[in-house]
Image (spheres, helix red, strand yellow):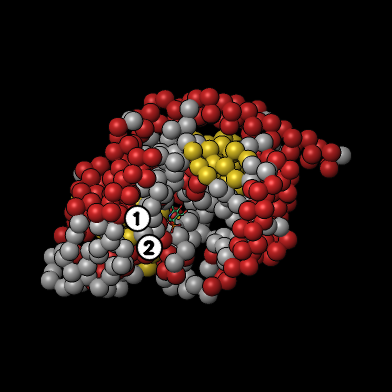
Amino acid sequence: MGQQNTPNFAARNSGRESQQRSQDALDIKGLDRAHHFHPFTDPQALVQAPPFVMEKGEGCYVMGQGMRLLDAMAGLGSVNIGYGRTEMAETAMKAMENLSFYHSFAAITNPAAAELAAKIAELAPKHMNKVFFANSGSEANETALKLVNMYWRRRGLPNKRLIISRDFAYHGSTMAVSALNGLDAMHKPFGVPVDGAVVHVQAPFWYRFGGTSTPEDFGLAAARTIESAILEAGAANVAAFVAEPIQGTLGAIIPPMTYWPEVERICKKHNVLLVADEVVTGMGRTGAFFAQETFGFEADIMTLAKGLSSSYQPISAVVMSDKIAATLEGKSAVLQHGFTTSGHPVTAAVALKNIEIIEREGLVSRIANDIGPYFASKLATLERLDLVGEVRCSGLMAGIELAKNKETRTQYPIEFGLCQHVAQACLARGLIVRPAGNILIMCPPFIITHTEIDYLIEILDDALQAVTELLRKAEA
Ligand SMILES: Cc1ncc(COP(=O)(O)O)c(C=O)c1O
């Protein structure tokens, strides 16, 4: 549930818990409050209200504190094959019994790591055949930034260091990667150096910034802000453009179809590397294994994480084009970079099993041809509501813009917390969605059924209407 605490929710449902369960939960809450420093959480809010204790997951549902919740966020856009698959647990157990760990430093490998690298290369766009393993999306992006710098040094262009990112970008939480994020709140409190390292350009966010232009024209104009940034800094100083094919965390911003081909053209023209952060979009979410196929472009480097193992184990990957690999491997020198658990035999085995399940069950083509279009059509029914400014959806990735006035596209002030109210109303009705500013985000598991989508929409519709009613009363 990301950045928000859920104070009222826990209290409201405590009546439904058995005595033992509530005692256990209280103990856990006490321990947690005393010792657990949470990511993306306001610690002061945790003092006011206890954390929510999640206990079990099954299919598209998670259970905690006596509640069964349809998880329209698949954790954090990651549990693509759904929760609680026995096959995954058995795979992890066997792998642990066989070789619980060995590293990949100094030219050592293990069968699962080698097979996973080959499998990713087989699925990836055909110009990408080399894979580096890490543990999180942040580590993969951090690695990509270092490899970009190394690439330009090897090519004799060490001045190419500036990275172009975008407003509304989210690429992770490590130091260098934080600088890419398109939100000051992610740099300033930590003193992350941004100036001189990263330039942020326009997001291809037509609904908010398109004005009177068509989405197609706006897509081209947004791409051309990259070219302006390159020209301003001088192409000789620009190393790469790093971007999510669909900006997920900060808004499910789906670019117009004109955007990515133009970005690719501009990067090629100015000799700037294109890094696609496919941490959320990769592994099938948009109805193709990689969003590069969905939007028709080729990156030099792509990063994967979340859906690579459906978050059953932490694993991420940096996938390189043959051009990048040829330069990085073209000289004898030890790569002075890596992580103890890069290519971990257990996580690699789990990721391989995850891919096997996705392929065996045809989950990606199901998104393209069946459940994705169904989700989009059901979501579109919400556009009749006063509070809904726009619904956007690509495969199983969706965003709902909440509007104060649909015609003028004005929003409620963020401090008003409208999205949080709607997310709370959904939660109270048994559904998890993610609030981000004035946008509700959803990335349900790939296995979600038509009936579950009907249920999801029914709850959303009801929650949106209930909040609209409260707003009317408050404004009367
Ligand atoms: C597009 C994108 N990149 C990178 C990350 C960071 O991944 P992690 O949290 O595994 O470090 C995220 C996380 O939400 C993400 O959405």
**Marked residue nearer the N-terminal end (1 or 2):** 2
Q: Residues within 10 Å of mark 2 (few under 14, many from 20)?
A: many
**Residue occupying the far front of the picture:** 20
Observer-nearest of 176 and 95: 95
**Residue 279, percent from left and from top:** 39, 51
| Ligand 1 quadrant assignment | bottom left
Secondary structure at badge 2 equals helix
Q: Is residue 235 visible?
A: no
Q: What is the quadrant of residue 379 in the picture?
A: top right
Secondary structure at badge 1 equals strand
Circle 2: residue type? Glu
Is the shortest distance between ligand 1 and the CB of mark 2 under 8 Å?
yes
- Which mark, by number, is residue 316? 1
Quadrant that contains the C terminus: top right
Task: Determine the residue positioned at 61% across, 63% down.
Answer: 31
> Do labels 1 and 2 touch, CB within 8 Å?
yes
Circle 1: residue type? Ser
Task: Determine the residue positioned at 39% across, 26% down.
Answer: 369
Observer-nearest of 398 and 241: 398
**Residue 244, percent from left and from top:** 42, 51
Task: Determine the residue positioned at 49% across, 72% down.
Answer: 192
Observer-nearest of 404 and 170: 170
Is the shortest distance between ligand 1 and the CB of mark 1 under 8 Å?
yes
Q: Is residue 341 left or right of residue 53?
A: left
Q: Residues within 10 Å of mark 1 (few under 14, many from 20)?
A: many
Residue identifier under label 2: 139
- Which mark, by number, is residue 181? none
**Residue 178, percent from left and from top:** 47, 65
**Residue 142, percent from left and from top:** 37, 64
Q: Is residue 161 visible?
A: yes
Task: Determine the residue positioned at 41% across, 49% down.
Answer: 311
